[in-house]
Image (cartoon, helix red, strand yellow):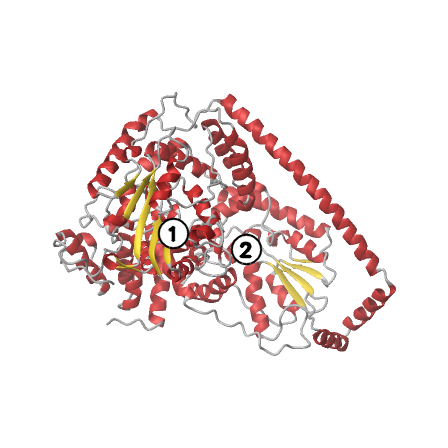
Amino acid sequence: MTSRVILHVGTPKTGTSYLQDVLFRNQERLVEDGIHYVADRFDAHFLAALDLMRLPWGGLETEAVGAWDALAEEVRRREGTAIISHEILATASRQQVGRALTSLGHEPGGTGTEVHLVISVRDLVRQIPAEWQENVKHRRELSYGTFLDEIRDPERATRIGAWFWGVQEIPDILNRWGHDVPPERIHLVTVPPSGAPRDLLWQRFSRAFGLDGLVLDLTGERANPSLGAPETALLRRINRAVNGVLDPPDYRPLVRELLAHQTLSQRTGSPRLTLPPDAVSWVTAIEESWIAEIEARGYDVVGDIDDLRGRPSSAPYADPDRPAERAVAGAAVDAIKALLVDNARVREEAGRLSAELHDTKSALDRAYLRPSYQRREAIVRRLQSSWGGRRLLGLYRTVRGRRQHG
Amino acid sequence: MAAEGPPGRPPRPAGERRAWGWVAHLRDGGTTPWCDWSAPAEPAGLFLPGAQQLELLRRINLASDRRIGPDLSRRVLEASAPGRGRPDLELVGASSGSDFGPRPVDPSDLPAEELIRVAVGLVADDLTADSPVSTGDSVWVRPWRTRYRLVGDPWVTDVWRDDLRRRGRPPGGATPRIVVVGGALDALLANTYAARAFDTGVPSWADWVGAFAARNTLAPRVDLAQVADNWARRSSAGSIRVVLDPRVAPRLLGVRRLPKVEPPGATGVELARLVASVLGLSTTPARRTALLRGVLAPRIRQAGAGARLAVPEEHRDWLTTRADRMYARLTAADYPVDGGPADLAPALEPGVTTPERADVLRLAMRLLTMRDLKTGGNAE
């Protein structure tokens, strides 16, 4: 039975996709050192999180039925240390946290399986624009201004506000997840500021998860590149135009992947999404309150608590709700180009498949013209025209192991 | 619930003890609002239930004409609201004192939507614990029956098909008569929506209709001309007949009568839609459909599903135009049609375009207490 579980529960936009990719790709290597990342597909822990929290997610939840219990059972079966990681776990309620911990063998007061909580955290100055952009990449149409208004509402009465703080408010996440976990088993990994060495965040993850010294394949596969302000504005306009006519299975590959990730994210010269100047003092006050709370609680900080003090950009603020139209037009041309190239590829493929279908149909028609086939068809038609004939045909087909449908 | 916290812990604040007293009161069937409650009690668990859960239990106690069983009250207090929305909220006057997290609330001020989220999860749990009733496929099949296929309005055809099966007249057979069931286009649209709500789940009624209006198209089963064309292309199909007047259908199907099908109630459909979304998180698609149609639908009918669904006013002209075009296509294609253009035009009967949340909550609570009564949940 697993003696130790490292439960990584958030937060989004803190390098979690990269971490999960590395863990997934190196499963066999990790097992050699008694570390288990139990996952038969790269999004296994995501599905488990959806199941635990009963979260719909654009149809993917149908693949998540029973996923949490299955994961927990497998984790308990293994010997050594197990790692579970998904950032949306941050928003679990106390009841859901209780169920999760119990299923992993945790017992009240911190006895039973030794559960360690890891939360990766980034300054709010970067998190806020990143979360809005993520909303837009998931079909949302709300403006940046509206998003800010909703997260500033102290009632958190909207889905946007409730979700944002549920996955970002570090002390509240710690209250819910850490309610019954000894403080020495709670670890915060801070995301370094922009400009830090590229591998610094990985070094911190490695230390927090006990992976130091292991030779792992650290190639990143899934990227979630960010867009500039004009590109995000364009994407929002696209959402408004297509949300009523484009189904989710088409939106994901065409808009999110082809346009956002593969095309618009390449425009790295455009102004970045940042916090508006009038929100800086509000965000700074929140960050300071979080830092004070974390320091007071004495949790293990892997990194530097000062990383949670965001550094507002010194560049002129680029408002994505009032973007430079020339920049948006440039982004739109790139998007149209990408769609045309992809459409040409699809047409070529359709042409090839059409030719294949034509050849197949021709072969079938030739088969139907054979005298033996035509004789059999005539007999079947004759039998079908009478009650006795249909009974006989049904009996024949039953004996042959087939039943007619339709 | 688990025992109280670690030994040596300082005494609980007065507000928290007052809240535990309220929890005990509600578990005993109490209905006193939080703001009027004062008696304290020792903790009965590691943490207090959320304000949504507590208020839902209070309202269930209030609405029920009998004391609900301990199992239902335990489940309500331990439930987490599925889906996105506000997390479990603390009670004002009994919060942990943390400066972080959502603001504590007076549970009486919570909107119905917050309680519906919790209630819908519980209704879904009740369904997964039950089994759909068998449709009786083992009935003797009449060899002289009319061979048919019933297509079109799914709300009506499902009921008729089940009835015919029970009478030994299942669909299918060689060269069956294709009976395309229609009616007033707004009713057809509402029926199709309701059938989807009790199947795979759908967006809200207004969004669903709006999406079709935006694309100037109709849901596949609603476009009777397309349905007829699809069947005409099948070599195994027999004659095709479009029925806009339900009185004609029994004769075409070789029976004297068919059951009257009540239009779906807006409140019931909305509840089914919400429950379907949650059920999709805990069961397979096939079982979800079976539970929604075989278990939830009869319970909703018994509890009362409310007034029928009405097409939002901004889409009525569009629908009227679509009805005219559909009739013209049917007659141009020479399909025999029982009924005239007036039978296909929107009937615009009075109804509800957006179900009241309070009504949806009431229905959900009624279903919970009905099942609690049925399973014999008695007070200790």
Q: Quadrant of residue B272?
A: bottom left
Q: Position of residue A76 (x, y in %)?
A: 37, 61
Q: Which mark is residue A83?
A: 1
Q: Give the labeled residue for mark 2.
A: B192
- Mark 2 lies on a secondary structure that is helix
Q: Position of residue B170 (x, y in %)?
A: 62, 71
Q: Which mark is residue A247?
A: none
Left or right relative to A18: residue A168: left
Q: Is residue B109 visible?
A: no
Q: Position of residue B110 (x, y in %)?
A: 28, 49
Q: What is the three-letter code of the residue carrying label 1?
A: Ile
Q: CA distance from mark 2 to mark 1?
A: 46 Å
Q: Position of residue A155 (x, y in %)?
A: 28, 41
Between circles 2 and 1, the one closer to the viewer is 1
Which image quadrant: the N terminus of chain A? bottom left
Tell me the residue at 27%/30% (across/down). Answer: A284
Q: What is the three-letter code of the residue carrying label 2?
A: Thr
- Foreground of the two, B7 or B325: B7
Which image quadrant: the C terminus of chain A? bottom right
The local crowd at label 1, few if under 14, some if 14 to 19, many if 20 or more residues have their Cα within 10 Å, is: many
- Foreground of the two, A36 or B284: A36
The answer to whether tags 2 and 1 share a subunit is no
- Foreground of the two, A362 or B55: A362
Q: Quadrant of residue B239?
A: bottom right
Left or right relative to B14: residue B108: right
Tell me the residue at 52%/39% (across/down). Answer: A256
